[in-house]
Image (spheres, rainbow, N blue to C red):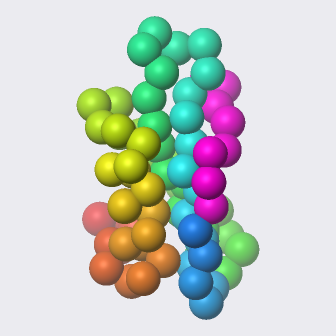
Amino acid sequence: MSYMEISTFMQDDLRADVLRTCEETPNYFGCRFWTAEVNMGIEWYKDYSESYVEDIAENYVMGIKKYPE
């Protein structure tokens, strides 16, 4: 699966990248989670909008969302 990075959220040692698939039908969004430069993994949200996934990324770096849950 190929994807591209749409935006990045960072605070302290937490980072979350909002992603969008490429060449899928339909394309969908996901979020890649980082802690202290360690890639923790990606969660895909096939039925949600870009703004919804951006809220998830923001919540992660603010410490509201935990990964993995």
> What is the quadrant of the C terminus in the image?
bottom left
Q: Position of residue 60 (x, y in %)?
A: 42, 72
Residue 63 appears anywhere in the view:
yes
Residue 32 placement: quadrant:
bottom right
Would you say the magenta stretch is mainly helix, strand or loop?
strand
Find out whether residue 6 is within the magenta segment. Answer: yes
Q: Position of residue 53 (x, y in %)?
A: 39, 50
Query: Which residues, given as a range, are shown in magenta?
Result: 1-8
Left or right of 52 in this view: 21: right
Residue 2 placement: quadrant:
top right
Q: Residue at x 60, y 13 (%)?
A: 23
Find out whether residue 64 is within the magenta segment. Answer: no
Q: How many marks?
A: 0
Q: Residue at x 31, y 79 (%)?
A: 64
Q: Position of residue 50 (x, y in %)?
A: 42, 42
Left or right of 2 in this view: 57: left
> What is the quadrant of the N terminus in the image?
top right
Residue sticking out furthest to the right: 37
Q: Nearer the viewer, residue 29 or 39?
A: 29
Residue 13, compared with residue 61, is above or below; it is below
